[in-house]
Image: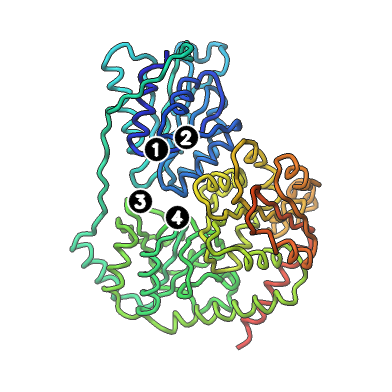
């Protein structure tokens, strides 16, 4: 017979709006698996590789902005969740992690599949909880229900994030033949009300007084979901108040009113002299651009960071004020309170943006075939309603260098690792009928090949694989690029092709090695199909590095012309 606390847990999840669970096979977790699988209002999927399973749950929760439940057995299975748990924590994505465990008395007694599971994720979860290992009396059931409610509420509370419930389970794990699981119709639930943070009149007066001393304001948008309301007020600030708004591709706030090609000139002293702000206002999470971070760290600007919980994020080492407010609320106030700014400051940024945009278009017309130019062409054919998932390393940097995008961009920039990018994109396909385009390099792609090891259809998945048979980014970094050990110890030379993987999993596949083949392949790449499609763009690592450097030089030469 399955423990009543487990049955109640699943009923509470459903009652509190958790509609999806990713399960990984195991015996110790069987009571949880059966309870989730048999609940009529929770959609379950089973993924054998726990590391991939956790990133898939992350990809789903990222899109839905609601917790997804993860269930695994005891022992090292729980450890395989860790990379995705850390990513979810720093990206503020809600996950409910449920790990089955052995009873306490059997831990560290040479019994199978036992590790120290309570608080195993340390500071990378918002909270760690432990259920009682029996429900012999009503107090234990009350305690169990209270813990589950508290955990789910915490996962949703700003900033959202992962929470962990460890669940010791004793045998028997399986119900008797024909035994039904009876879910309570009205499980014990308590919800948490959400409130928006409002700055006091006194705070607004102080901020307004301080604003009067600034005439060059730079707004920096970090990683976040698209937000039409926020986009509108930022565009208004740029048009009317003449502030400069810098957006990375992962900010999902790029528009004709924002600066998105800054990586081409920031860091070049000859082009950056008139760009220094007096005040930096940041919001959102991380930014990709290292040149932007280094540039702002060298300024003498004050820095205000806007975040609902008011926590300090001193990315630019210039932090002078934290503002506990939602960005929409704060920038709506700023649009009213702020006087028009120094237009010469804004024009300096806009002029470089426009020149770079024109220069890139011209340079690509005559550039040789390589990852950079190939990806630029692929993006010109990507549907505007497609969701783009991009892997770390060079893939996301290429995307950022190419500027404004219409599509929603997702990237695992919480920890910026290459692991899990395939799985996160797969999770996204489980939530939408829109095309999901994964842009990835060979190292990230082959590292996470178990993302496709399951039985679920992904007809809307398209994969653009940049395969240079090495870790090409290390040729772009001055340190490793100058070492004789570059090719053996940094680049990770490999001869893999995606063709065998495509055959194994039943994907459509095409490889291209030049522009003509690329143009032909893209003619039907985005046409509807019943299977995912892989477009493998094969290039050579050294030539890609040379091409990127050449394009940067040619763009910089154009910008330098007065």
Looking at the image, which residue is at 48% across and 62% down?
Answer: 252
Question: CB atoms at circles 1 and 2 under 8 Å apart?
Answer: yes
Mark toward the start of the polypeptide (4 vs 3): 4
Q: Nearer the viewer, residue 442 or 506?
A: 506
Name the quarter where the N terminus is drawn: top left
Image location (x, y in percent) of residue 449: 67, 41
Label 4 vs label 3: CA separation? 12 Å
| Residue denoted by label 4 | 285
Between marks 4 and 1 in the image, the one whose residue lies nearer the viewer: 1
Residue carrying label 1: 18
Does residue 486 appear left or right of residue 98 in this picture? right
The spot of residue 523 in percent (x, y) is: 70, 64
Q: Visible in this render: residue 474?
A: no
Q: Which quadrant, please, contains the C terminus?
A: bottom right
As displayed, is residue 405 above or below residue 163? below
Name the residue that disc number 2 marks.
21
Asked if the residue at tag 4 contacts the one at tag 2, i.e. Cβ–Cβ closer than 8 Å, the answer is no
Q: Residue at x 55, y 53 (%)?
A: 411
Label 4 or label 1, whichever comes before in sequence order: 1
Give residue 69's quadrant in the image: top left
Q: Pick whichever of labels 2 and 4 is earlier in the sequence.
A: 2
């Amino acid at each position: 017979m399955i423990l009543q606390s487990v049955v109640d847990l699943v009923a509470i999840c459903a009652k509190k709006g958790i509609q999806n669970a990713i399960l990984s096979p195991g015996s110790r977790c069987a009571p949880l698996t059966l309870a989730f699988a048999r609940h009529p209002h929770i959609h379950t999927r089973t993924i054998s590789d726990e590391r991939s399973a956790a990133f898939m749950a992350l990809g789903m929760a990222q899109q839905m902005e609601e917790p997804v439940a993860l269930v695994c057995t005891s022992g090292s299975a729980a450890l395989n969740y860790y990379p995705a748990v850390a990513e979810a924590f720093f990206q503020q994505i809600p996950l409910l992690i449920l790990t089955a465990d052995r009873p306490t008395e059997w831990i560290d007694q040479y019994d199978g599949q036992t590790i120290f599971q309570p608080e195993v994720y340390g500071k990378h979860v918002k909270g760690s909880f432990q259920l009682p290992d029996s429900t012999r009396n009503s107090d234990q059931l009350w305690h169990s229900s209270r813990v589950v409610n508290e955990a789910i509420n915490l996962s949703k509370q700003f900033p959202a994030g992962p929470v962990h419930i460890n669940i010791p389970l004793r045998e028997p794990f399986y119900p008797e033949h024909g035994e039904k699981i009876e879910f309570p119709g009205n499980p014990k639930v308590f919800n948490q009300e959400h409130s928006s943070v409002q700055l006091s009149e006194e705070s607004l007066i102080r901020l307004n007084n301080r604003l009067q001393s600034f005439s060059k304001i730079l707004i920096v948008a970090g990683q976040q979901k698209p937000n039409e309301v926020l986009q509108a007020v930022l565009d208004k600030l740029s048009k009317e108040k003449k502030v400069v708004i810098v957006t990375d591709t992962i900010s999902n706030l790029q528009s004709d009113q924002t600066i998105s090609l800054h990586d081409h000139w920031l860091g070049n002293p000859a082009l950056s002299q008139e760009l220094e702000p007096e005040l930096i206002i940041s919001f959102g999470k991380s930014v990709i651009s290292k040149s932007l971070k280094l540039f702002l760290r060298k300024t003498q600007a004050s820095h205000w960071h806007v975040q609902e919980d008011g926590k300090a994020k001193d990315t630019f080492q210039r932090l002078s004020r934290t503002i506990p407010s939602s960005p929409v609320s704060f920038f709506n106030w700023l649009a009213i309170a702020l006087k028009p700014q120094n237009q010469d400051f804004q024009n300096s940024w806009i002029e470089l943006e426009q020149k770079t945009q024109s220069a890139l278009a011209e340079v690509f017309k005559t550039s040789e075939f390589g990852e950079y130019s190939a990806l630029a062409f692929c993006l010109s054919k990507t549907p505007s309603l497609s969701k783009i998932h991009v892997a770390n390393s060079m893939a996301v940097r290429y995307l950022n260098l190419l500027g404004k995008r219409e599509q929603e961009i997702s990237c695992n920039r919480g920890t910026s690792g290459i692991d899990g990018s395939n799985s996160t994109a797969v999770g996204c396909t489980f939530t939408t009928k829109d095309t999901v385009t994964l842009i990835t390099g060979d190292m990230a792609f082959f590292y996470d090949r178990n993302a496709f090891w399951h039985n679920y259809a992904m007809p809307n998945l398209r994969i653009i694989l940049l395969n240079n048979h090495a870790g090409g980014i290390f040729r772009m970094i001055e340190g490793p690029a100058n070492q004789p050990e570059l090719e053996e110890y940094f680049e990770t030379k490999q001869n893999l092709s995606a063709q065998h993987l495509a055959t194994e999993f039943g994907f459509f596949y095409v490889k291209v090695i030049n522009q003509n083949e690329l143009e032909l392949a893209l003619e039907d790449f985005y046409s509807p199909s019943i299977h995912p499609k892989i477009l493998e763009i094969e290039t050579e690592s050294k030539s890609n590095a040379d091409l990127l450097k050449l394009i940067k030089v040619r763009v910089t030469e154009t910008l330098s012309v007065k």
